[in-house]
Image (cartoon, helix red, strand yellow):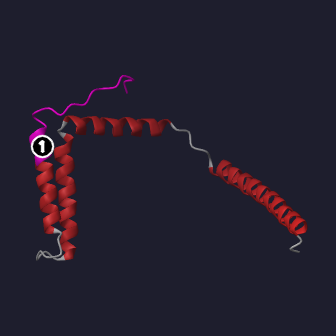
């Protein structure tokens, strides 16, 4: 992955592809409208077909190629992550739960003390 930012410009060859994606989207929206004769079970298929066609057309645009390259780089970075073991995860979860319990008890004590003090100062209790 390069560190320099690439300028993304829509080329003239990409415009028909974007227009085709827009037309496919309009068709999918029209076909999934309640007033059409297509049953709702087939409307899901219409959206799946729309997604597949749109992604395949998008792949051949400049922006699409950059997006797929970014996804590939992100996948490679995820493979480099060293995930904690199950034992480490359980231990850290228990530590966090104990700390949260202690802090919540401290906040409860401070809150109760302040309520008692304000009650005494205002003679409400």
Q: Is residue 96 left or right of 16 when viewed as pictured?
A: right
Q: Is residue 68 left or right of 60 when viewed as pictured?
A: right
Residue placed under numbered mark 1 in the picture? 17
Q: Is residue 98 above or below residue 16?
A: below
Q: Is residue 99 left or right of 30 when viewed as pictured?
A: right
Closest to the observer, 46 or 35: 35
Q: Quadrant of the N terminus?
A: top left
Q: Is residue 107 left or right of 30 when viewed as pictured?
A: right
Q: Quadrant of the C terminus?
A: bottom right
Tell me what residue is drawn at x 9 percent, y 42 percent. 16
Category of crowding for the residue at label 1, using alpha-carbon neighbours closer than 10 angstroms: few (below 14), some (14–19), many (at least 20): some
Q: What stretch of residues is rendered in magenta?
A: 1-19
Dominant SS in magenta: loop
Identify the residue at the far front of this view: 122
Tell me what residue is drawn at x 18 percent, y 59 percent. 49
Closest to the observer, 35 or 51: 35
Q: Is residue 82 covered in magenta?
A: no
Where is residue 82? Give x, y as percent. Answer: 56, 39
Where is residue 106? Give x, y as percent. Answer: 82, 57
Closest to the observer, 62 or 90: 62
Q: Is residue 12 covered in magenta?
A: yes
């Amino acid at each position: 992955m390069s560190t320099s930012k690439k300028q993304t410009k829509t080329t003239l060859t990409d415009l028909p592809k974007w227009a085709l994606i827009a037309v496919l989207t309009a068709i999918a929206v029209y076909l999934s409208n309640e007033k059409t004769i297509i049953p709702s079970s087939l409307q899901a298929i219409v959206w799946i077909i729309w997604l597949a066609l749109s992604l395949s057309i998008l792949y051949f645009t400049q922006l699409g190629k950059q997006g797929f390259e970014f996804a590939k780089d992100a996948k490679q970075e995820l493979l480099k992550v060293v995930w904690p073991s199950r034992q480490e995860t359980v231990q850290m979860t228990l530590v966090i739960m104990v700390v949260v319990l202690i802090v919540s008890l401290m906040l409860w004590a401070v809150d109760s003390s302040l309520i008692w003090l304000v009650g005494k100062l205002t003679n409400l209790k």
